[in-house]
Each structure stands twice: as structure tokens, then as C-alpha cells.
Amino acid sequence: MAQVQTGKASFYADKFEGVYTASGEKYKHNKLTGAHKTLPFGTKVRVTNLENNQSVEVIINDRGPYVEDRIIDLSKAAAEQLGFINKGLANVKLEVVDPGDGKTKEQPMRTIDQVTVEEKEFYEFAVSRWQPKGFGVQIGTYQELVNLMRLAENLKNSYQKQVKVQVKIINGVKYYGLILGQFPTREKAEDFREELRNKFPDVFIVEYDRL
């Protein structure tokens, strides 16, 4: 991507404090971090609020935001420095200050083709195309396959449910939706969604026939 980008910025809600980001770090509202759709983890970006000209430098350690007109999701501390806590959104300019090395500080990882992997990590695959019926519960949308695989493994072991992946393209970029379960009715899917809410606040029900 270009070294300069303009668009809207949002910031993390308080409920995400302590939740793991896509890089493996925990989100902390008092750290200067951000989520971007494509920039490698560890990239330092200067974000300037075009409405008041205030700037802050943040480290990219997560993926998102997945809303069409937004280009970055900032920690609360970064949003406070930019002065848009009360507004919720701001028109900003992003400039890459330091491309970094694709690694995070808290949890060093190697990068291969912009996908973060640990040195010795193996997964067994049994892949088949699927025509689902009924309802499922989507956990989230991911771009890095290794994060998808780790989470899928944990979810399958924890909840003993089918784990399915939906491939989707948003603004020309490929993402993977992680969906749990195949329920015959919306009511059963809603019961399972409530079971997941404590760990995954943004889970939502999908109707397979409408995907």
C-alpha cells in the first residue's frame, strides 16, 4: 500500500481491554497501538487528525477495522491524544514512520509472506467444500491464516462444535470468517451465542442459506 493513506479512524471499546489481538498481544487501552487491514505487525504509523492537526504515533498489532469507510482502529490512549473520544470517529491521515520487522515486542514471531508463525508449528488438515444449512455463530473475521488455525483448534477443543471457514473478499482483500456450529433453528444458535459472549463479545448469528 502507499505510504500515506486518508480515511476515518475509530477506537476500541472498553470491553476489549485484555482481549488478544491478531498479533498475539493483549489489547491495552493505555498503549499506543492500532489495527490495520494490511500493514505488517510492528509497523509504526503516524496518525494525524485532519480536523485539529493533532498527531500520534502507534504500533500496528491487530487487524481491522472491517467497516468499509474506516482505515484504522486505535487504542483509547491514541484516540485521546487525537482528541476524538467524544465524537467516536475522526478523519485522519496515516503515514508509515517505520515499517518495522513484522514482529511484536511482547511475543516475537517470525513472518513468512506477511503471515505470522512460530518456529515449529504444525496443523493437520481435512479440507472439503461444504454446503451448510440452518444457522451458525460467527466468531470473527481474520486475514492471517495462522491466527485462524490457532483459534479454530482451540474452539473445536473447547466447545466440541463443527468449525467452518467462509472465504470472503472485502474491497479486493481476502478474509476468512470463522463460524462455529450448525443449528437447525435460530433459537438454538442464539443459546450458543450467549454461551460465547463472555469470551467473544462481538459474535453474531449467520444464516447459512443467506451467505
Image (spheres, rainbow, N blue to C red):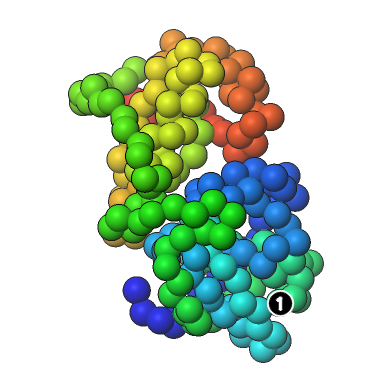
The location of residue 57, given as percent across then percent down, is: 61, 77
The location of residue 166, given as percent across then percent down, is: 33, 35
Q: Height in image: 58 above or below 63?
A: below
Q: Residues within 10 Å of mark 1 (few under 14, many from 20)?
A: many
For mark 1, give the secondary structure.
helix
Q: Is residue 127 visible?
A: yes
Q: Is residue 205 left or right of residue 124?
A: right
The quarter in which the N terminus is drawn is bottom left
Residue occupying the far right of the picture: 86
Q: Which residue is mark 1?
A: 82
Query: Which residue is painted at 53% across and 47% down in the image?
Result: 24
Query: Which residue is painted at 52% across and 16% down in the image?
Result: 159
Q: Which picture quadrant has residue 47? A: bottom right
Q: Is residue 1 left or right of residue 180?
A: left
Q: Nearer the viewer, residue 30 or 175?
A: 30
Q: Amino acid at mark 1?
A: Leu
Q: Nearer the viewer, residue 187 or 34?
A: 34
Q: Disc count in the image?
A: 1
